[in-house]
Amino acid sequence: MKDQSQNSVKNPDVSNSDNPLSPFLNKTVLLVEDTQSILLTEQKMLDYIGFKNVVIANDGQEAIEKVSKYDIDLIISDWNMPNLSGFEFLQWVKQDVRFKDIPFIMATSQAEKEQANRAIDAGVAYYLIKPFGPLELSYAIQTIFDPKGAEKIQKTQNRMTESGKVRISIAHIPITDHVVLGVLQHLITTKQLIPKNFELDIQSKLLWNPVQTALDDGDVDAALILAPIVMDLFNHGTPVKIVLLAHKNGSICVRNKAFGSVDLDKASLKNFFKSKVFYLPHTLSVHRILADIYLRDLGLNPGYVGQDDVDVRFEVIPPIMMPDFQSQDVNAGGFMVAEPIGAKAIDLNVGEELVLSGKLWSDHPCCVVAMREEFIDSHPEATQEFVNMFIQAGQFVEANKKEAARIAVPFLDADNNLGYSDKILEKVFMDENGIKTVNLKPDINDFDRIQKFMFDHHHMGTCIDLEKLIDTQFID
């Protein structure tokens, strides 16, 4: 193997006979990523998995130099990068007879299926949507090198419990947008609500991508998930319906305090955010629309690398990691995210509140309760009872905010790893412009606004028939 001392990472030997990737850990990986904080995170993931030889490049042009210099066995590349994009690099690799057989993982925030299909048609071996974790990255690599040994997705075979009720498997991530689900679980556990037709099987995941994949593959029956993700899944054939909203409002825009104090007038904030990075939790999110509204009102032009005249660059970051990333990233100006992530950053004195999302778009939708059609069709009574009780739990949150905060802490942070507290969550629930958990019927006009904004301003997706996606029969 050629010398790799330049711009490479030498990891210690990882000897683990239980690691299914053990036969492949001596392979050389080219990691291409322009955002340093994400590059560091992905390097740590590869180190955690056990890869010993990792060569890094900061854009597609540098990646061409590295793939020409080193014996590369696997490429993991971002899509949106300066100088030469990941897609252009992919095309170059697949057109060169020397390198066309190198497996190529596109690790990107480009979450639309249309973009994934475009990359697959161009030759990617695996399309990995940001944000992702080491388990997802391991699965992607194992699928490439050992597809027969890749972990098989376990479908839910037996939905009926011993009590004769149907099991509703539902996924979510640990944000206060999903507090109603935790309160519903509490009310059932304490027998304040007694379902006749269903039992809950709640799957908490740290990132949006596993929730999206589980819903798309049918590993769960339902999910509390970002509305634009569901709209994109529906547009590409996933049999899913939106049965009600998970909440209204509930997000916050936070400024990075690492740069010191800043006047909060428009001119000062425009100067502050110009040429900086702005974090989003997902490309397909209402947060992207809210951030666009806020930054454009300051006179800025936000967007992604490669887009014309962009003066604030969006970057997708796992929600729970935003405070830590922001405190360490000298280029990060701030973020738009669901609570209590912003409240935590403020509590840690690494962030300053700029605006709550309810002020940018009053009573806006964000996360929805999406359910797979086969479950709705097979279990209408359980679906109806679940919707009824979810609404009751939302009313409980509205009427008992301090108790809801107390219930939410162990539900969202069961292992006490995220640093949530009653104090932080109580502040989130008590703010008059904060999260709302009542009147959860989806308004088709709101979703039409979302899809038109995404299409007109971001050239993403196609407009779908919302009447076929939104199913209000149960909430009605």
Image (cartoon, rainbow, N blue to C red):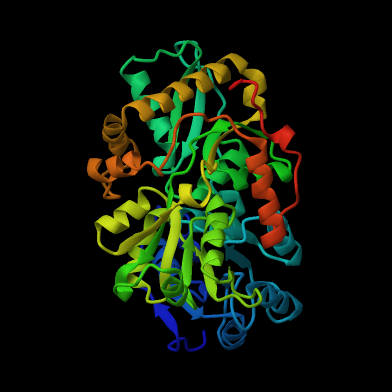
Tell me the quarter of the image containing the C terminus.
top right
Q: Relative to 398, is 20 above or below?
A: below
Q: Relative to 26, is 232 above or below?
A: above
Foreground: 474 or 377? Answer: 474
Q: Is residue 237 left or right of residue 51?
A: right
Foreground: 53 or 271? Answer: 271
Residue 152 visible, this angle: no
Give the quadrant of residue 297.
bottom right
Q: Is residue 332 left or right of residue 166?
A: left
Residue 92 point in image, percent of width and height = 71, 79
Residue 305 point in image, percent of width and height = 59, 74
Foreground: 74 or 398? Answer: 398
Q: Residue at x 29, y 57 (%)?
A: 346
Q: Residue at x 58, y 39 (%)?
A: 215
Residue 294 point in image, percent of width and height = 51, 61
Residue 465 point in image, percent of width and height = 76, 39
Residue 254 visible, this angle: yes
